[in-house]
Amino acid sequence: MPRAVDILIVALLAPLVFPLCVILCALVAFDVGRPIFFRQLRPGFKGSIFAIYKFRTMTDACDGAGVPLPDGQRLTRFGKLMRATSLDELPSLLNLVRGEIRLVGPRPLLVEYLELYTSEQMRRHDVPPGITGWAQVMGRNKLTWDEKFSLDLWYVDNRSFSLDVKILVLTIWRVISRNGISADGEVTMSRFKGSGELK
């Protein structure tokens, strides 16, 4: 899907998305406090590093030693709703406008995972990352890491305009059905610890 189509879709949705973001800013500030946005470095196309933006869904609660509590204890009820509906991802549209991500592509993961990928897994960075992707609509966080990477690489090898449209349609259904939000026993997904030959 050409980047121009991404921008056109965002422009068409702007009259709906902008007022919604204003409301969510107020709700997030009331629920988890400031800052409103979560900012984290992620690897993008060819491994280039950029800062992704999302709405915060967790508090800064710590234990007596000042260590942050586990994610499950810091994730608020409103935060769970935000994640279930993917509304926390709306600020990532700024990354799209800046050309750092696309609507569709492999999800940008943590920078620390780069040194854990096999040479084959690293191919997921041969295309720009996306807000949604083939792995997300095929199971999201219910998938194992190996399954996610396999689906990401299948997308890299088979991407097309029609496939991107299919993924966008399936994404809407996934958001409505709230399927695959988290892995069993996890708030979202367990951390990737590497597999196979290191790159």
Image (cartoon, rainbow, N blue to C red):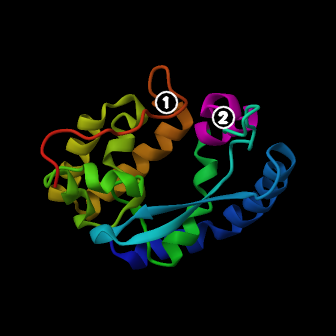
x and y percentages locating residue 13 in the rendered image: 61, 66
Q: Quadrant of residue 35?
A: bottom right
Q: Residue at x 35, y 57 (%)?
A: 165
Residue 8 appearing in the image: no
Does the stretch in magenta take in 33? no
Q: Residue at x 73, y 60 (%)?
A: 21
Q: Is residue 157 left or right of residue 37?
A: left
x and y percentages locating residue 24 in the rendered image: 77, 53
Q: Is residue 72 left or right of residue 197?
A: right
Q: Is residue 155 left or right of residue 48?
A: left
Does the stretch in magenta take in 77? yes
Q: Quadrant of residue 73?
A: top right
Q: Secondary structure at mark 1?
A: loop
Q: Which residues are magenta?
A: 69-84
Kindly identify the amino acid type of the residue bearing the numbered disc 1: Ser
Kindly identify the amino acid type of the residue bearing the numbered disc 2: Lys
Q: Earlier in the sequence, mark 1 or mark 2?
A: 2
For the C terminus, the quadrant is bottom left
Could you say which is closer to the camera, residue 180 or residue 34? 34
What residue is disc 1 on?
182
Could you say which is closer to the camera, residue 194 or residue 184? 194
Q: Quadrant of residue 53?
A: bottom right
Q: What separation in Å lies between label 1 and label 2 (alpha carbons)? A: 10 Å
What residue is disc 2 on?
80
